[in-house]
Amino acid sequence: MTKELQWLTEKATAFNSLLLATSNLRCQEAYIAYTFYYLPKLTYSFPITTLTEKECDKLQKRITTSFLLAFGFNRNFPRRVTYGPATHGGLNFRHLYTEQGTLRLQHFISHLRKNTTIGKMHLANLLTHQLISGLSSPILEATQRPILYLSTSLLTETRRFLSEIQCTITIPAATTPPYPRANDTHLMDHLNSPNYTTQKLQHINACRLYLQVITLSDICNGRGSHVLPEAMQGVTITASHTTWAWPRQHRPPEPSWTHW
């Protein structure tokens, strides 16, 4: 996002210095400029960006001050009230970080419902992330629990935003399959905990992906009494076969198998 942030900063700076700082807009004109020009101009790419809240704060800092002055408010007007909804006495300014998250969700849900090509790609991406996570709960439903070993992506940032606004998305096609055996359990449900560092979790999960296993029964013998030697030694398990499209994972180095 470095290049995109640089481009957005240039647009915001140009808008602020050329249009706001050098003009004498009336309050109504400033509102029109904010709603119908500034917001669409800066948020056009937001459905596919992953800017952090700190980056969005920096991006909007100067231009928010300029708009406050154009509306007749003090430049130091409390920002919580500035971005608060009008129904609660706020000025109804749009925080760019919230706008980004909202537009990402709208883009995601809209394409899924319309079953477009992009929607099918979103679903495939979601199913892949679900498989890589190794968790029993759909990752867009159980959003309060962080998955630190997943690489940062558009989907993981969307999940983070859902967690922050305390929302979930239920997608029937993304539900997890039932357990193959009684008293079975997902391995990563137990391992994804604060007891392990992010790096150690990444090593463990890489071993799991190499073996192409999800549940405890995948690495046990038929009776469920012992762990298979192949699972302990990091050798492809010949006793089980999968038809799923697993991500390509080379055999992790020995230190990773020590964690495993």
Image (cartoon, rainbow, N blue to C red):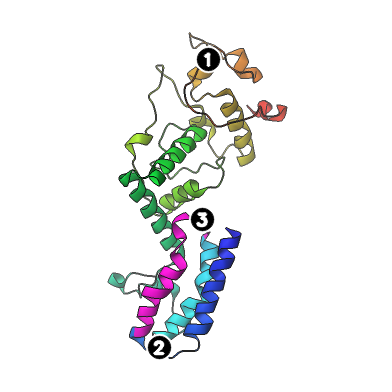
- Please provide percent x and percent y for residue 64: 46, 76
Secondary structure of the magenta portion, mostly? helix
- Please provide percent x and percent y for residue 12: 52, 74
**In the image, is residue 30 above or below residue 39?**
below
**In the image, is residue 234 above or below residue 99?**
above
**Can residue 58 be seen from the camera position used here?**
no
- Please provide percent x and percent y for residue 185: 45, 24
Q: Earlier in the sequence, mark 3 or mark 2?
A: 2
Chain part drawn in magenta: 29-52
- Say which quadrant the C terminus sits in: top right
- Please provide percent x and percent y for residue 226: 55, 12
> Which residue sits at x=40%, y=58%?
103
Report if residue 38 lies within the magenta region: yes
Residue carrying label 1: 220
> Which residue sits at x=44%, y=81%?
67
Residue carrying label 2: 25
Q: Quadrant of residue 81?
A: bottom left
Q: Residues within 10 Å of mark 1 (few under 14, many from 20)?
A: some
The alpha-carbon separation of the residues under discs 3 and 2 comes to 33 Å
Q: Quadrant of residue 143?
A: top left
The alpha-carbon separation of the residues under discs 3 and 1 comes to 40 Å
Amino acid type of the residue tagged 3 in the rendering: Thr
